[in-house]
Amino acid sequence: MFLSGEPHRNTLPRYVALLVANGAVSYGLITALAAGPFPGALQAKIVAETVLFFVNFLVQRDVVFRRRKRATATDWDAYYAQPTPTAHLTRRYTTAVLAETLRRYLAERSPAPEIVEIGGANSGFIDAIARSCRASRYHVIDSNAYGLELLRERPAGPCPVELHEADIRKDPPDLGGDAVLSVGLIEHFDRIGTREVVQAHFDLLRSGGIAVITFPTPTWLYRAARVAAEAIGVWRFHDERPLLRDEVLEAVGDRGRLLHERVLWPIVFTQRLMVFERTGR
């Protein structure tokens, strides 16, 4: 009757609380009415339950099963212009993990790999990864023009960098990288969009290439940190939905073989890192 879109863990406690309160109020009303204007218990119950019916309807519609607000898209221009104060700390840790992971899995595959980063506008990972892996070329694909412009203004690094302004789901560039990575990208889409973006990683890979994907996962720490951030009004990624590993594995399907995974707890908004080898078409 009430399509709120909220998970049961939120609506069930509110519904049980209403049920308990409704029983207590109903008993009180029936007792009071039976002792006053409606001497019969049946008459008192009919009047009390009629009044409570309308009250319950309003409470369930507006409180118990309140409709969730539609998530608004993240304002990436604003984020690139002014990153969160803690971004440089978490980015340093993430950079070290990515560089070590890619070096580990690319060492035997390519002495001078070509690396592709999806959603990498204003990326802070390029130099460390390119240096660690001795990359021959580094591609960045993003649909955000402002973030790419910031990246274009950066000083020259250890390898050539090519920027591609494109929607990876609609107009992907014709590339064949030894490694494709994305950091905090696939969670900003609905389930269908997430699948399309995950699949795009493998479309950009050579056979046997490596895909490294990180995404927020709903650990207790992530949930607590996000509730706190939203409560004080500093949460900026309104369309972010933390993903379970099974959804990502399903999206990969037979395109890749899982080589490694771990949860990056120090980020607080915990990220799961998964490494795949391209195996399918």
Image: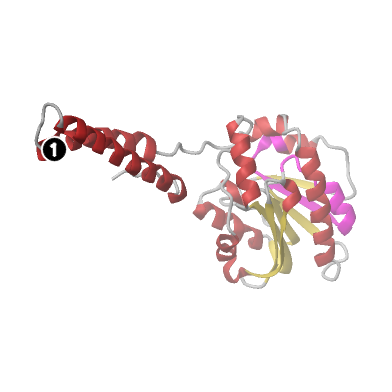
Nearest the camera: 95 or 205? 95
Image quarter in which the N terminus is found: top left
Q: Label 1 sits on what residue type?
A: Ile
Residue drawn at (34%, 38%) of the image: 21
Residue drawn at (73%, 52%) of the image: 265
Residue drawn at (67%, 46%) of the image: 269
Q: Is residue 164 visible?
A: yes
The magenta region covers 121-147
Image quarter in which the C terminus is found: bottom right
Label 1 Cα crowd, 10 Å radius (few <14 / some 14-19 / many 20+): few
Q: Which residue is mark 1?
A: 46
Q: Is residue 150 left or right of residue 190?
A: right
Q: Is residue 237 visible?
A: no
Q: Is residue 111 left or right of residue 273?
A: right
Asked if residue 279 is positioned above or below residue 217 in the image, the reply reads below
Queried whether the magenta region covers residue 190, the answer comes back as: no
| The residue positioned farthest toward the front in the image shown | 35
